[in-house]
Image (cartoon, coloured by chain):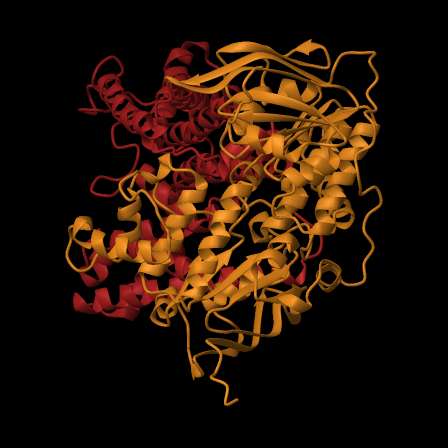
Chain colours: A red, B orange
Amino acid sequence: MKGAWSEEDRRHAAALAATYAAAAALALLAAALFILAFGGSIRVAFATVLQASLGTWGGFAQTLNKFCPLLLGSLAVAFGMRGGHFNIGVDGQIYAGAIGMAAVAFGLEGLNLPWPVFVPLGILGGVLAGAFWGLIPGVLRVRYRVSEIFVTVMLNFVALYLVDYLANGPWNDPLAGDAITVPIPKSAVLPQMLPKSGGHMGPLIALAAAAGIYFMMSRTIIGYEIRAVGDNPTAARFGGININRITLVIMPVCGALSGLAGAIEVSGFHQTLLLGLTGPTGAPNYGAMSILIAVIGRRHPLGVILAAAVFAILMVGSDSLQRSIGLPGSAVFVFQAIIVLTVLYVEARRQLST
Amino acid sequence: MSAAPPRVEMRGICKRFGEVVALDRVDLEAAKGEIHALLGENGAGKTTIMNILSGLYRSDAGEIRVDGRPAPIRSPKDAIGFRIGMVHQHVELIGNFTALENILLGHEGTGWVLRAESQRGAVEEVASRYGLSVPLNERVKALPVGIQQKIEILKALYRGADILILDEPTTMLTPQEVDALFATIRKIAEGGLTVIFITHKIKEVLANSDRITVFRGGCRVGTVRRPEASRELLVQMMVGEREFPAGAGRPGAVASSSAGPPALSVRDLSLRNADIHLLKDVSFDVPAGAIVGLAGVSGNGQRELAEAIAGLLPVQAGEVTIRGRSVEKLTVAARIALGLVLIPQNRIDEGILPSLSLAENFVLGLHPYIFKRSGFFEQGTAHEMARIAIRDYNVLTRNERVPSAHLSGGNIQKVIVARAMALFRAIGGGILIANNPTRGLDIMAAAFVHARFREVREGGGGVLLISEDLDELCSICDRILVIHSGEILGGFDGPDYDVYRIGELMAGVRRRQP
């Protein structure tokens, strides 16, 4: 962002790196103790996780496929936080985006559009649906001073049951069973990046979105105003910034980012609309993980990219732990929680000591 | 004389914040029964060394002794153990608790239930010993600042402090309250306690201290006894060999031209919160080319008036015009565009974006104007403007990239004033409303700010200067209005002011009509 790094920037970066190194070391230690307590081998466990998530093309593709919604979801949380808004509605916005994508896919099926037109249109449908889902809490906050926290949480349920209805009702695929729609047309499917291993183009779109958010935050006037409102809304108001206007930008953008994730999940991964889009069953949803990733990534696009990658690796690697050392698959969520807690702890200590 | 060791002795105290040296090998001692003043400009290190003595900060080097014995103070708890208590500049009481509950808070003994009543007698005993009469049953938020401060002092004394530190205790008080405060302090010192008070007001020091230690730039310049001190000597010790900015002195004749609309005109402005009149039929003008002062004790509607004019608070009735244009229903940004600039009262809460860089703070409010051409937020432009302001206003900071929360209060205020002046130029002048703009600034910086206000006046702009410091108002204003309980009780034309009459009105004493 700036030219040459000064002494103090370097020191700041070093302190930050030390914080995360300390947190990582603590988390690894805690994870190792946990594995020992279950009678597993630490070396085997760590090797399995890395081998499963990064060591094969298939595993790598899976990791990328998980990385995409995690990155977009956590951007949707981090972006809101930068502006002082708490978006707890990532799951609902993902569902809204998925509905938007599916609606375009089913609605325009008869036009026989070629994929370079059909896929972007579908994704646009998902983005707009997500943005609408984000706009609702924004409007309620501006008009009636309702906390966006409650509204976004409640809208998660609304979106979930809307998908439930659509996937069991009008769009249901009777051959596939409950809570799943017929497949979207082939020309609405997002092209594959790693065709043999099943990796779609979504992660590239997500990285582009992260770059876009970074640019918006650091180089645009609205981005500056968002950061100002997030840092001190009173001072921002004194500076002539209209906070209501900022809310009406932030919340739809949050929704659009999650909606993009939902559209990509439908177009690239599931190729159908179904319940359970927001994460594998028995695991925390993308929405909950996104909040953790946004916090660990310090609400910064670059930090969020790194944290989302780590979480994707852990999620994919966790399945194999069960096979290799008989650890329950959910053990990985314990590790993730340990990482979050250690980062928060080390960070708090660092701030206290200065 | 086999002198007893001083009550407090600090030797070779050093403290750095990052690269800024806040204290450089400072020695200090205070005796039993002494009122010891720490005098210095903002950022001179006076508050820092007292924060070390009271355990809020740890020194990087140096030694503290109490009664000649080493006193390793690492936390406020340690400091209380050595019977050191500090009352901070801003009152830190809980508004919804009674005075008694505040005094006992954190000290209510064992158990989960606050049994305030059982200790009422003990508190009253301490209060009467030092003549600190406070209404123990009142909720703190309903009490004037002067009383709140007494509660803070009583709280420190009740906890056993016999070395009492007061940080800028008079900032928020009326002249009468200041007198009462120093009478109390004297009584406390006569009771054998040591009182150390921090200030940048020479007048207070000369009137109320036994010894004076002067700080400058993180070093101790020297300690003088009261009889040997004079205004000239103290000023010289405080500021060293420096020139005052030009333009200081008495106000000139009103330069306003009768042609053209006033910079600001307020008519019958009323603001109510439930049944309470915050502002009642306020009417006045600020002519173009004039500085109008608004005198009054803090909390009499000054903040509400400024915010209502700026469009931050909705009003029930009345009209505001800026340069002849009615601002009814206009947003804050639209009022700025018409020519209104506000320097807020509370610089931390209302003025800065704490974790954003100084440069990004500097352009707040300016940003719609300076980035208009490209439409993008240009870090380069922001940094360049901030560097110029840092140089012109002598802001103490490493550079323009540090988060603004790292700056001291006085330096934050300089940034806010610099920003307001830049904005004022960017929008082509109009009306500058400054709410206590020099609070916490040192002599040089305050004089510099006053010189900027005079520039505004000479450029044909208007200034509404809200201040609790009557000396400041008298030195610079062409006219002074007095506000009390949300009403303008009178107006006085300069340059010679009847300070006592103004003081009466500040206290709400209306002269009976003949």
Q: Is residue B12 left or right of residue B239?
A: left
* Residue B242 image-quadrant placement: bottom right
Report x, y in % for residue A134.
40, 24
Report x, y in % for residue A243.
51, 25
Q: Is residue A166 left or right of residue B324?
A: left
* Residue A282 image-quadrant placement: top left
**Towards the viewer: A247 or A267:** A247
Q: Quadrant of the C terminus of chain B?
A: top right
Q: Is residue A101 left or right of residue B434?
A: left
Q: Is residue A115 left or right of residue A219?
A: left
Asked if one can make out residue B218 in the rendered structure from this viewpoint, the answer is no
Asked if one can make out residue A54 in the rendered structure from this viewpoint, the answer is yes
Report x, y in % for residue B293.
67, 29
**Towards the viewer: B217 or A166:** B217
Query: What number of labels is visible?
Result: 0
**Towards the viewer: B179 or B337:** B179
Residue occupying the far front of the picture? B514
Q: Residue at x 50, y 59 (%)?
A: A16
